[in-house]
Structure formats: C-alpha cells, structure tokens
Image: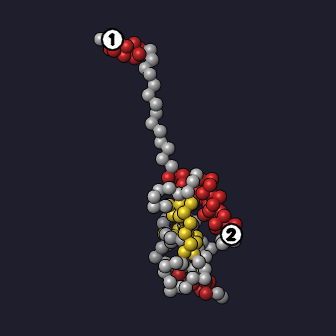
C-alpha cells in the first residue's frame, strides 16, 4: 500500500472540505486543487502528488492553471506550483489547458474535467450584453411623434 492510498484511507471520511447534502446523491468537495469538485481518490489534491487547479484570473480575463510540482519539498510553500495565465476565447483556452494538463503527460486523466472548468470560467467572464437598439416608431406612434415635432 502506497502512502497516497494510506492518506486517502485516513482523510476520506473526516475531511473539512467535504460537502454532503441530502438529495444530491454524490459527495462533493471544496478543495482548491480539485477540478471536478467530486470527493474521490482520483481527483483529490490532498492525496495526489500531481494536482491541477483552475481558477479565474484576478484581472477578470482568462484563467490561471496551477500544476503542483511533484518533486517539490513537502515543507516548502513557495515555488511548489507552476502557474500559467491563459487568455483568449473559450476554444483557445480549452486547447491551452488540454496541452498543459494532458499532452505534456502531467495528468491525462483530468483532461476532460479541467477543460470543462476552464471553458465555463471563460464563458462566464464574457460580458457581451448588448442593449437592444431603439427602433423608430411606426404607424400611429410615428404620426403622433411627427405631429409633436411640428408643434
């Protein structure tokens, strides 16, 4: 049994990040490095040496993809993550996240969840709310406006 398996056995039921609610059917988690937000061994960032965290950028443009350095000193806090700032549209961000997470061989099993999370964040950042254009009045309203303009 590896140390990761042992850690999972110790923390899987007594963890402060667990979210259990009646009617959900699944157990969720609030861990920062858990891309799918599901409480399971595969996605847990507390147990796995390699974890992926995807959060919105502070400036509101793009996402920050943080990957944990697997050979980092466990006592070190600073410089234990590689952080990539990815900007652009949803398709560009999805491709970049897939390259960072899976194609480089980091955690190919988390590709789908990480691309889905990054795409959802970028789509939420879009503020393309246009106000409807004002149409010219037609019919009786147009005649009434023309009569008011003449007087």
Q: Percent from the top left, x then y, of residue 66?
A: 55, 69
Q: Quadrant of the C terminus?
A: top left
Find residue 94 and report its image quarter: bottom right
Label whose residue precedes the other's in the sequence (1 or 2): 2
Q: Is residue 81 above or below residue 103?
A: below
Q: Is residue 31 left or right of residue 113?
A: left
Front position in the image: 91 or 108: 91
Q: What residue do we see at 61% from left, 76% from top?
A: 50
Q: Is residue 117 above or below residue 44?
A: above
Q: What residue do we see at 57% from left, 75% from top?
A: 68
Q: Is residue 103 visible?
A: yes
Q: Percent from the top left, x then y, of residue 10?
A: 54, 84
Q: Which residue is mark 1?
A: 150
Q: Which mark is residue 104?
A: 2
Front position in the image: 5 or 88: 88
Q: Quadrant of the N terminus?
A: bottom right
- Local packing at callout 2 (Cα closer than 10 Å; few below 14, some 14-19, many 20+) is few
Front position in the image: 36 or 130: 130
- Local packing at callout 1 (Cα closer than 10 Å; few below 14, some 14-19, many 20+) is few
Give me the C-alpha separation between circle 1 and circle 2.
Answer: 72 Å
Helix, strand or loop at mark 1 = helix
């Amino acid at each position: 049994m590896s140390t990761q398996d042992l850690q999972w056995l110790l923390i899987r039921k007594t963890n402060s990040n667990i979210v259990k609610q009646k009617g959900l059917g699944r157990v969720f988690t609030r861990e920062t490095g858990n891309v799918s937000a599901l409480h399971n061994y595969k996605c847990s960032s507390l147990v796995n040496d390699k974890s992926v965290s995807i959060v919105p950028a502070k400036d509101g443009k793009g996402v920050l993809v943080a990957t944990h350095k697997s050979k980092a000193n466990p006592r070190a806090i600073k410089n234990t993550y590689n952080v990539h700032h990815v900007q652009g549209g949803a398709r560009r961000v999805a491709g970049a996240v897939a390259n960072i997470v899976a194609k480089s061989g980091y955690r190919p099993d988390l590709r789908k969840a990480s691309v889905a999370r990054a795409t959802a964040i970028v789509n939420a950042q879009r503020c393309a709310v246009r106000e409807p254009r004002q149409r010219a009045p037609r019919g009786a309203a147009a005649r009434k406006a023309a009569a008011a303009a003449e007087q």
